[in-house]
Image: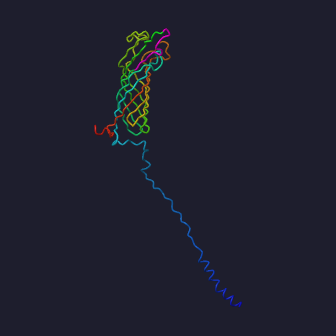
Amino acid sequence: MKKKLTLWIIILLPALVWAQQDTVVHTKPKQKKPAKVQSINPNQQNQPIPDETKPNFNNESLFKALFVGGLNLSQVDGDAETGYRKVGAHVGVGTVIKFSKRFSTSIELIYSMQGAKPHYATYSDGTKNKYDITMDYINVPVSINVHDKKVVMFGLGVQLGVLARYSQTDSAGNNVTKNPDPKGEQPRKIDLSGQACATFFIKRRIGIGVRFSYSFLKLRDAVQGSRVKGEYNNVVSIRFSYLLDPKHPKWKDKF
């Protein structure tokens, strides 16, 4: 009996070992995918940032017409009066040369009504103060402009003005145009000013903005009692503008 049992163990033992080896599941290790290497195009390094690229002149013009209308609030520093109390017209035309999406230059021809009014319209005794200076200029402002998303335009530059009309009355209402204070000195015929402007565009064509300008050169000596040594134009302009592009779809059939 023992011999038979030993014989069966010798016969079955290899079969059991083989069966166990056959039931083991061999799994292959997952192979890592090679990382994708992006090819570098040497031309991409030289490509400009989209905001700095030139505009597409197939869709818009290099030169755009500009029409301006508005009001001046002005004073003359050095006349012993204060406040932007002189109100006058501010009208003209110009052109905007947009040579990139962010930058442009502009030149305008503006008729500008400027001058000064008294700080107090009446005296303590009730009499009216009729002091008035009227100085109308033909101004040529030249600006370098920065555009922000075709909505806002900031400009900075200089302005050359030619005196077109001048008159002056004193506080009593006497015409002193030919012999004004001080010493009958007439204002300078040429005015050179610095100017800064901000314009907010609606639908990329209609804009509303503000311009500030101040004389570099004195117009004449200041009157007695003034805080400055000369008279200078000091003007704030509220402007409405229309920017016309002949290549805009609205105007293509009209040009």
Q: Is residue 78 magenta?
A: no
**Residue 223 drawn at (x, y percent):** 46, 13
In this rendering, position of residue 162 left or right of residue 39: left
Farthest residue, direction right:
2
Between 130 and 194, the residue placed more toward the observer is 130
Which range is magenta?
114-125
Q: Residue 217 is drawn in which quadrant? A: top left
The quadrant holding residue 56 is top left
Residue 236 lies, in percent from the top left, at 44, 24
Q: Quadrant of the N terminus?
A: bottom right
**What colour scheme was applied to this rendering of the protein?**
rainbow
Q: Quadrant of the C terminus?
A: top left
**Residue shown at 50%/10% (left/top)?**
124
Task: Say whether residue 124 is magenta.
Answer: yes
Residue 51's place in the image compared with 155, above or below, is below
Going 49% across and 15% down the picture, which residue do you hit? 226
Q: Residue furthest front?
A: 126
Quadrant of res 52: top left
Task: From this view, report whether residue 244 is shown above or below residue 35.
Answer: above
Q: Indicate left or right for 10 with 47 as reference.
A: right
2 vs 82, nearest the viewer: 2
